[in-house]
Image (cartoon, grey):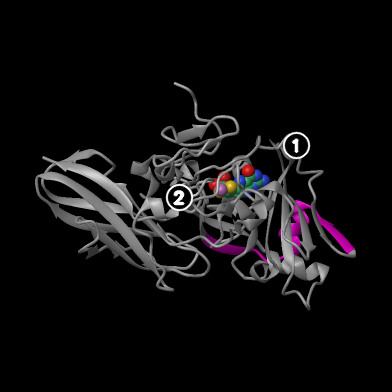
Amino acid sequence: MNKIPFDKHEQFVIRHQNPFNGGAPLNLLTQNHVTPTNLFFVRNHGDVPQVDIDSYRLNIQNKNKNISFTLDEIKNNFARVEVSATLQCAGNRRQELMAIKEIPHELPWNVEAISHAVWAGIKLKDVLATIGVEKEANNLHVQFQGLDETERLGKRFNFGGSIPFEKANHDEVILAYEMNGKTLSPVHGFPLRVVVPGFIGARSVKWLNQIIISDEPSQNYFQRIAYRLFASNINSDNVKWNDGLMLSEMNVTSVICSPENNQRLTSGFVTVCGYAATGGNRHIARVEISTDDGNTCMQAELDKTNPFAWTLWKVNLNLEKGKHQLIVRAVDSSANMQPKDVEQVWNFKGYMNNAWHRVNVIVE
Ligand SMILES: Nc1nc2c(c(=O)[nH]1)N[C@H]1C(S)=C(S)[C@@H](COP(=O)(O)O)O[C@H]1N2
Ligand SMILES: [Mo]
């Protein structure tokens, strides 16, 4: 049997070897509110860089100033904070979209491109304060760049992205050097990564070595072209990249992790469980389970309903013999609801699928 790299769990599901991408199997995905690091999903666009900590610097730049910090300076000069936050890839649940119409060159994520960790590091806003951008900051953006390289459209470049300056000054946005009580591992961004709770995972740039304060969003491929949301009639032949919505906050979603699709069950009470999550600083308000295409529903029991964190839920259903389709749908604290069908959210890059999640079971 092939050994799973990067200290991942022996049942870790590898979606792509090179660069390494994968996540937890469904039976282990929602066993703990805090995902064990060896089950935390991995989304890489290039090889994991080997960082020499002696020469490592974090460089910060605005129009007329440059500052750089060693890792020790980052740890010693700024207050350590902890943030409990879920990361989710905008491509989570792409597989359901691919079942309707092909989405070439993208990873076929099932529902595992999401995990939760307790991160520790320093507030991004504390670092930004050292370079002194105080006023007229409303239209600024904070750009990040990582040390990993990737190739798109025939060019090699580093992964990057940006967030609005306003979000960058929220207390929950941190530069993390620890994950679940341990030094950040190489595959999750050692020595330093951004964690932007409530935003798509792509903005949580790993192997961070550069921050630029600018009056425009990052020109990096992964901000300017990828991670944009287009209407269902747009495809790679007619796309005008600037017309797509530049993704930032996650939307409300929910997923059934157990039972799994096409699982056989014995009649009687069955525990159905999974996760729900939303974006911004919203939290999950309600999770509903239906066995009749959404006409009637039961409310699930929720573990925690904090902003920036997923909610694990469960419900006991009494299922009679026969075929059933189980459906989950969630409502968040702004009363955002999920669309009924995957067809309503199909887009040619396969992002942000938050349709009702459906699982077919056979009860014997
Ligand atoms: N430098 C760098 N940062 C990155 C990426 C990357 O490929 N390179 N992938 C991004 C994407 S798309 C996601 S979803 C998250 C995944 O974080 P994880 O691998 O720690 O789960 O990291 C983001 N940060
Ligand atoms: Mo992602």
Q: Quadrant of residue 289?
A: bottom left
Closer to the chain start, of discs 1 and 2, is 1
Provide residue 115's location: percent of width, then percent of height: 47, 51
**Residue extent of the magenta highlight:** 65-84
The residue at 75%/65% (across/down) is 127
In this view of the protein, which residue sits in the foreground, 248 or 44?
248
Spatial CA span between label 1 and label 2: 30 Å
Q: Residues within 10 Å of mark 1 (few under 14, many from 20)?
A: few
Q: Quadrant of residue 199?
A: bottom right
Amino acid type of the residue tagged 2 in the rendering? Trp
Provide residue 190's location: percent of width, then percent of height: 66, 45
Q: Is mark 2 within 8 Å of ligand 2?
A: no
Residue 321's label in the rendered image is none
| Residue furthest right in the image | 64
The residue at 38%/51% (across/down) is 342
Provide residue 175's location: percent of width, then percent of height: 66, 58
Residue 187 visible (yes or no): yes
Residue 223 visible (yes or no): no
Q: Which residue is mark 1?
A: 156
